[in-house]
Image (cartoon, rainbow, N blue to C red):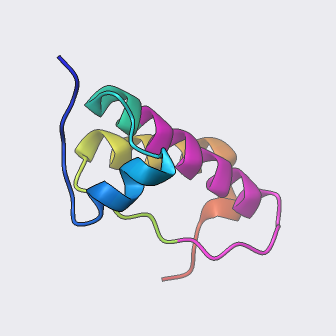
Amino acid sequence: MRWKGGGAYIEQEQARGVVHGSKEATDAAYDAAAGQLLAHVAQGRPTALMLATHNRRSIQHAVTKMEELGPACNFPG
């Protein structure tokens, strides 16, 4: 069965080809993008970053990635 998850912009996103075929694929794409952005931060590259999700696993993935990348990913707060 194809995932038919929806959102406020689902029609526009489908037209752009950015809708993934499953919830798992969507989560994996989010996690990969978050990891790439965190790596940019850790390398000292200018990066504005705010990660937001309702997915607890993705939050844990981002926190683990930040711990792996070290102190450069510790944002002042």
Would residue 8 be visible to someone looking at this image?
yes
In the rendered image, residue 60, in percent from the top left (x then y), is placed at 36, 43
Question: Quick one: 22 or 59, which is closer to the camera?
Answer: 22
Residue drawn at x 28%, y 56% is: 10
Name of the residue lying farthest toward the front: 15
Pinpoint residue 18: horizontal percent, then vertical percent: 47, 46
Q: What residue is at 82 percent from the left and 58 percent from the top?
A: 43
75 in the magenta segment: no
Q: Nearer the viewer, residue 74 or 16?
A: 16
Q: Is residue 25 above or below residue 17?
A: above
**Farthest residue in the right direction?**
44
Magenta residues, start to end: 28-49
Question: In this rendering, would 47 be left or right of 22?
Answer: right
Residue 73 image offset from top left, x and y in percent? 63, 61
Quarter assignment of residue 8: bottom left
Q: Is residue 75 above or below residue 18?
A: below
Q: Residue 53 location, x and y as percent? A: 30, 58
Is residue 64 visible in the rendered image? The answer is no
Q: Main secondary structure of the magenta part?
A: helix
Q: Residue at x 78, y 75 (%)?
A: 46
